[in-house]
Amino acid sequence: MAEIIDFAEIQAARRKARVPAPERENLERAVQLMRENLAAVAAELADAPRGEQGELLTRVERLVALIRYGMRMLGETTDAGLDGPASIRSR
């Protein structure tokens, strides 16, 4: 099991090293902005009329997918999403 963890850490370090510093900073800012937008949409969802909830949930799903993708690009997670290999390993 320790070998798997070490391999995952090595892969994360390689991904992190591949993104040049200025691009990494831009990507980090983009992910942070999407997190803030997600929080705002979640707050709207709490008080939204039933007719608007579907559109807001779609926005939440898209923001979550974009944040997850950005985090993978930054090497902060190896989670491939609900349908990816990481969810299978956690069972």
Image (spheres, grey):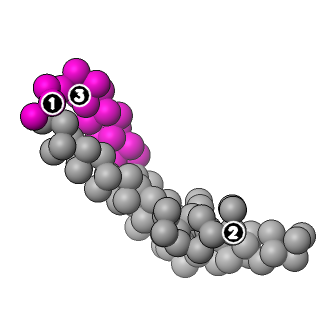
Instruction: Please state which amino acid type lies under the numbered disc 1.
Output: Arg
The C terminus, quarter of image: bottom right
What residue is at 49 percent from the left and 62 percent from the top? Answer: 82
> At which x and y percent is residue 53?
19, 36
Task: Classify mark 2: residues with Cα within 10 Å, few (<14), some (14-19) or many (20+).
Answer: few
Provide the secondary structure element on which disc 1 rests. helix
Q: Which residue is mark 3?
A: 44
Q: Which residue is mark 1?
A: 50
Measured Cα–Cα span from mark 2 to mark 3: 34 Å
Distance from the alpha carbon under mark 3 to that under mark 1: 12 Å
- The residue lying toward the viewer, choosing from 23 and 36, is 36
Please name which of the two marks, 2 or 1, marks the residue nearer to the observer.
1
Circles 2 and 3 in contact, beta carbons < 8 Å: no
Which residue in the rendered view is the most extreme toward the top?
47
**Residue 37's quadrant in the figure?**
top left
- Amino acid carrying label 3: it is Glu
* x, y percent for residue 36: 35, 38
Instruction: Quarter of the image for the N terminus: give it.
Output: bottom right
> For the residue labelled by badge 3, is the local secondary structure a helix, a strand or a loop?
helix
Q: Quadrant of residue 40?
A: top left
Pointer 2 residue:
89
The percent position of residue 87, horizontal first and vertical second, equals 60, 64
Magenta highlight on residue 40: yes
Q: CA distance from mark 2 to mark 1?
A: 36 Å
Of tags 3 and 1, the one toward the viewer is: 1
Residue at horizontal 68 percent and vertical 77 percent from the top: 11
Tell us which disc is closer to us: 2 or 3: 2
Range covered by the magenta-colored residues: 32-51
Horizontal side of residue 86 vs 35, given as left or right: right
Q: Residue at x 25, y 44 (%)?
A: 57
Q: Is residue 34 left or right of residue 24?
A: left
